[in-house]
Image: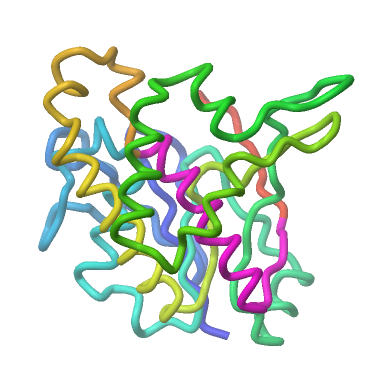
Amino acid sequence: MKLKIFTVYHKEYPLPRKNDFHTPIHGGKEINNWILKNIEWDNLWINISRKNPYYCELTVHYYIWKNSLYKKYKYIGFAHYNRRWKINKRLVNNLNLSVDIVVPKKIVISKSYYRSLSIIEHYSLHHNKVDIELVENIINSDYPEYKSFINVLYKKPLFINSMYAWNMFIMKPNLFDEYMTFLFGVLFKLEQKNFSFVKSLYSKYQQRIYWFLGERIFNIWIEKKKKDNFKIINSKVVLLPKNI
């Protein structure tokens, strides 16, 4: 098994214990001058590092993808400075058995005694509904193979609804290439439509729109992979304090 996990940093924070799995990398290095020893940068070759305030960790995903830094590994994954995969015997054994995709356990987004909120309703409560509707329009018009899987955004289970979050995953390199092609294809088309509004009218928090929408797009993509019978497992993510 040849696994590589890029752990993304945007500020000073203790590095993961040195091992063959983890490579720490600075997201948004182009607009941030602090330097840590033994950490990679996301702005050396083809990059969107300057867009980090809008894309967050996804600037690192893009950098690894466009510069083909994933191709020599059997599995490629991403973690955050304060959210890290628990690399245990179960996970390693599953990867050795050729699992296709590892996802974090879903997070609960809605609880109700009657009917929970859908993913799109939850998004609309916290962000601008127009943006996720634009994503839906782009997928419907330009990515017809995913059209039927948009319904994952509208499902309203009884009592509890949940979703895959954090833009974290571990997967085979061919699937990573496929997902990045889909993800950035959608997000760059969206950026062309709404970036002037995002930059001038959104708060600093809401400007992270493309990261927030990336989480929802992942749920659409993974729904299709389930239908296509790919081997997908959940694995534990360890949450660390934001400040140490």
Residue 189 pos. (x, y %): 20, 48
Is any atom of residue 30 visible in this view?
Answer: yes
Q: Main secondary structure of the magenta part?
A: helix
Residue 240 placed where, x, y %? Answer: 61, 35
Residue 38 appearing in the image: no
Q: Please name whichever residue, 13 or 198, is drawn nearer the observer in this view of the structure.
A: 198
Most foreground residue, 82 or 76? 76
Judge whether 44 appears above or below 15 on screen: below
Would residue 125 be found to the left or right of residue 196 on screen? right
- From the viewer's perspective, is 136 left or right of 79? left
Measuring 54% from the left and 32% from the top, which residue is drawn there?
A: 120
In the picture as drawn, the residue positioned furthest to the right comes out as 113
Residue sitting at 16 percent across and 31 percent down? 195
Image-based side of 136 in relation to 149, left or right: left
Q: Which residues are magenta?
A: 211-235
Which image quadrant: the N terminus?
Answer: bottom right
Is residue 74 highlighted in magenta? no
Residue 222 sits inside the magenta stretch:
yes
Picture mark count: 0
Vertical arrangement, residue 10 with respect to residue 7, above or below: above
- How is this picture coloured? rainbow
The spot of residue 85 in percent (x, y) is: 62, 54
Residue at 47% x, 63% y: name it.
Answer: 5
Task: Residue 126 in the image: state x and y as whole percent.
Answer: 49, 18
Q: Give whichever of 237, 62 is nearer the camera.
A: 62
Looking at the image, which residue is at 51% across and 27% down? 123
Q: Quadrant of residue 131?
A: top left
Q: Is residue 9 above or below residue 130?
A: below
Judge from the rendering whether residue 151 lies leftward or rightward of residue 54; answer left or right. Answer: right
